[in-house]
Image (tube, grey):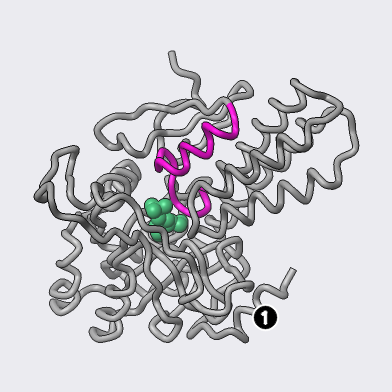
């Protein structure tokens, strides 16, 4: 009998159980539900890079647990001189993926605690901090869900892109957190989930999550959104984010920018739901955000079968940037920003 903690559920994507890190393998969903166990920082970094776990906040939460694994390893090996090995592991974790700021935000928060620790055994304090980061993320998503749902008059249908759900976070979800709260409030009819080529986060993960939650969901090819908006009945496009620049430009899954242009053309409102750990005031504008390029094979294969000619390459940027002027509202756990600007973001981030 599997322990309750390891039941495959969207809110159980990242599990610290019996002093081990278990990750629901999102490469296999929905066909197979299996967990990958990470025993150390290197395995955790590999799991992030290979997208066993993905989604900006989920990457941050996972990296925090990766730091706990690192400290436990190095403290056990060398109780008097464990820090250098941990610092090297911090670099390995930071190199896992370049775009989601939550990875670096979580590592910096763990590093700040490391710098303060002087007790003999650092592991308990670090585990408590990682668990706190995890718990805070879920609470932020629940708060955002309610704030975002309050903006929806409804009942209406919405489009979402990629997966910004429980699987992409510590639990509950950002964009899908708004979807969950709006559905519970009777404001949501149906979610149209872009399949989100090439990794299919929408048709595999969002569809699985919403189906598990009993929320009406229809998968659509990425090029259907325009005609669906033209038909009418779509009130909102609701997406997550991997990094929001100081001026309000939003970096998110490739294809988000095109959705924002279509939404503005068709008078559909465009909502970005993201915790403040996704806002990066150190980056002035979206053009300065590093965009991850992944293997050409992700584009040239589908379901493990090569679909493109062997001799042909592929361009596979996996994020793009939506200019702030195309974003109607950014929803964070601290509050809502209509028509985001640098000034409004700075004021929000100055709040404690
Ligand atoms: C809640 S943030 C989720 C965010 O992350 C996804 O990217 P990936 O699946 O490559 O990690 C996508 O951009 C989602 O919007």
Does any portion of residue 95 appear in the rendered image?
yes
What is the chief secondary structure element of the magenta stretch?
helix
Left or right: 227 as drawn, with respect to 205? left
- Give me the residue at 55% from left, 63% from top: 278
Which of 313 and 69 lies nearest the eye of the viewer?
313
Where is residue 311 shown, x and y percent of the image? 13, 51
Looking at the image, residue 166 lies above or below residue 80: below
Q: Quadrant of the N terminus?
A: top left
- Give me the residue at 72% from left, 75% from top: 350
Where is residue 241 shown, x and y percent of the image? 45, 64
Looking at the image, residue 124 lies above or below residue 57: above
Left or right: 32 as drawn, with respect to 151? left
Q: Quadrant of residue 83?
A: top right
On whether ligand 1 comes within 8 Å of the CB at mark 1, the answer is no
- Give me the residue at 46% from left, 78% from top: 329
Q: Which residue is mark 1?
A: 347
Looking at the image, residue 300 lies above or below residue 179: above
Q: Which residues are magenta?
A: 40-59
Where is residue 16 shown, x and y percent of the image? 58, 30
């Amino acid at each position: 009998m599997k322990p309750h903690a390891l039941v495959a559920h969207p809110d159980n994507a990242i599990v610290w159980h019996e002093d081990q890190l278990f990750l629901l393998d999102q490469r296999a969903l929905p066909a197979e539900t299996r967990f990958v166990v990470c025993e150390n920082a290197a395995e955790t970094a590999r799991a992030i890079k290979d997208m066993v776990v993905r989604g900006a906040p989920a990457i941050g939460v996972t990296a925090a647990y990766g730091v706990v694994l690192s400290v436990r390893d190095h403290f056990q090996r060398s109780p008097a001189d464990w820090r250098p090995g941990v610092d090297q592991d911090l670099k390995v974790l930071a190199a896992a993926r370049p775009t989601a700021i939550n990875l670096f935000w979580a590592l910096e928060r763990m590093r700040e605690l490391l710098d303060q620790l002087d007790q003999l055994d650092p592991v308990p304090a670090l585990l408590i901090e990682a668990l706190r980061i995890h718990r805070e993320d879920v609470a932020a998503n629940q708060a955002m869900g309610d704030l975002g749902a309050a903006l929806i008059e409804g009942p209406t249908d919405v489009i979402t892109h990629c997966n910004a759900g429980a699987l992409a976070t510590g639990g509950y979800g950002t964009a899908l957190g708004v979807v969950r709260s709006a559905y519970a409030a009777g404001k949501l009819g149906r979610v149209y989930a872009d399949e989100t080529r090439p990794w299919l986060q929408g048709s595999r993960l969002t569809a699985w999550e919403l189906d598990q939650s009993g929320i009406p969901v229809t998968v659509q090819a990425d090029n259907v959104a325009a005609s669906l908006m033209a038909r009418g009945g779509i009130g909102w496009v609701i997406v997550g984010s991997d990094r929001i620049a100081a001026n309000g430009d939003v970096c998110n899954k490739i294809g988000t920018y095109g959705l924002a242009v279509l939404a503005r053309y068709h008078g559909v409102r465009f909502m970005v739901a993201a915790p403040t750990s996704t806002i990066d005031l150190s980056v002035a504008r979206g053009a300065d955000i590093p965009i991850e390029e992944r293997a050409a094979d992700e584009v040239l294969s589908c379901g493990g079968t090569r679909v493109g000619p062997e001799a042909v390459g592929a361009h596979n940027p996996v994020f793009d940037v939506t200019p702030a002027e195309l974003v109607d509202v950014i929803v964070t756990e601290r509050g809502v920003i209509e028509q985001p600007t640098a000034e409004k973001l700075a004021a929000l981030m100055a709040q404690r």
